[in-house]
Amino acid sequence: MQKAIYIIGAGLLGKRMIDWAREAGAAVIVTDKNECAPGFSRADAHAVIDGTDKKGHLAFVKKLEKIYQIAGVYCGNEFGAWTVYELSRALGLEMNTKDAIHATLDKTVMKKMWEEAHIFTPMLLDAKSASQHEMIIVKPAVGSGSRGVSVVSGNEVESAVVYARNAVPENSEVVIEEYVEGRHIDANGVWLGGTFYPCGVLERFFTPLPDRLPMGGYDPANIPEEEKNIVYELLKKSSRALGITFGPVKGDFIRKPNGEYVVLEVAFRFHGDVSSVNNLPFGSNINPLKFYFHYIMTGDIHLSYIKPEKSRYAMWRVICAPPGIVKEIPDTKRGADEYIISVWLNERCAREIPRYRNNAYIPGLICAYGDTKQGAENALKRYFEGNAYSVIFNEKEKEWYRNLGGALRAHNFSLQACGYDESVL
């Protein structure tokens, strides 16, 4: 019976992981809620199932059990977390406990456990105490992709709570915490056989307040090697405090101006496809998914897959097209060369681009690499030369779009390399 890896999610940005699973010797089974998911054509078996549909996945696995021996299950987002748990349990695979998964999915529980373990994290607040703070951050207790997240003054807490609840109506719980200023540093790791293996450190950059939407990132992160070790140790400690004992983990951290680090969130997966599939392997030459898949298939530790190199530079950007009615979308092949890793255009924005406050409504994403940081940025510039969104600009969003451009400049991003259109202003 052929050994297989079961992957939940078959989108464009994650297609390479299917190839990497096959390189590890696996048959590849994929599912996605989109019947036209790009990864289906690369899989040995596939099914149209929403990542949250536990019963649907269990029924599909039942049909496959006479053909494949499923050696591992992976999902790159939180929405499929419980499905991964139920499938792993049904298949008799090593997994984290139910309590550990619950802790990673509920930000309130997560933060309370860290406070008990004396791990530095932004302080939890209630509505009354929040009003005494100059700046606070409000977000849904469950969810990802920047949905419902905002940074406001303490006296705006009520409106921010309403926004957070409306953004994730399936869960009305909201987290209010102190706002910590600093750089956003991300890290991947994996727990195997009781040992923690570091799997890459990256940096992300965000939109102007009050929104907290990531607009781009770099690999490698521009921090000293000794600081990367501090980040890894914090990821190790904070994930262990939640009870995570097996498999991928990712952490979001803030590097404060004084150089101290605090942990924001941890999840039992790697950072999303943009970072872990389309940046790390092309910049630092770290491939956490190859590392994990080879372990699943062979039980061996291939450290070469997670050994960093300093030979190249990778970056990603949100395509910062102006809000408005879309006249023409870019051709993802025109202007692309060997240094363009991936281009993804959001189908939700094919006709109209709204003000984008979360990942669900960004116009698109683009990833590139080069021998240097400037080389990677030049690849993005070449792509956007004569190949950007053509939009009838929504004049009501002029101030927001101008502020977005200001934030890109503050991050030292080239506007041209982000597909930003200054002419509409």
Image (cartoon, rainbow, N blue to C red):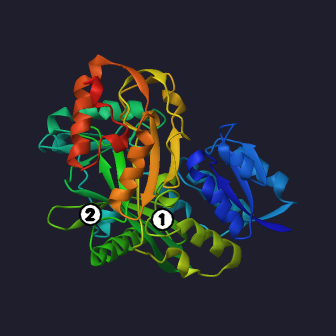
Vertical side of 30 occupied by 187: above or below: below
Q: What residue does disc 1 label?
A: 249
Instruction: Indicate the amino acid at tag 1.
Output: Val
The residue at the point 66 percent across, 44 percent down is 38
Where does the image place residue 315, in percent across and percent down from the top left? Answer: 40, 55
The residue at the point 54 percent across, 75 percent down is 305
- The N terminus - image quarter: bottom right
Along the line of sight, which residue is nearer the eye, 129 or 58? Answer: 58
Gap in angstroms between the C-alphas marked 1 and 2? 17 Å
Q: Which secondary structure lies at badge 2?
A: strand
Looking at the image, residue 43 sits to the left or right of residue 164; the answer is right
Decide if residue 210 is in sight here: no
Q: Which secondary structure lies at badge 1?
A: strand
Along the line of sight, which residue is nearer the eye, 269 or 355? Answer: 355
Along the line of sight, which residue is nearer the eye, 109 or 178? Answer: 178
- How many numbered circles does the render carry? 2
Where does the image place residue 417, in percent across and percent down from the top left? Answer: 36, 44
Instruction: Indicate the amino acid at tag 2.
Output: Val
The residue at the point 30 percent across, 50 percent down is 205
Along the line of sight, which residue is nearer the eye, 158 or 44? Answer: 44
Q: What residue does disc 2 label?
A: 262
Which disc, if any, is residue 57?
none
Where does the image place residue 263, in percent across and percent down from the top left? Answer: 31, 62
Tag 1 and tag 2, C-beta contact below 8 Å: no
Looking at the image, residue 318 sits to the left or right of residue 80; the answer is left
Where does the image place residue 349, in percent across and percent down from the top left? Answer: 48, 28
Neighbor class of circle 1 (other Cα within 10 Å; few <14, some 14-19, many 20+) is many
- The C terminus - image quarter: top left
The residue at the point 30 percent across, 41 percent down is 415
Q: Earlier in the sequence, mark 1 or mark 2?
A: 1
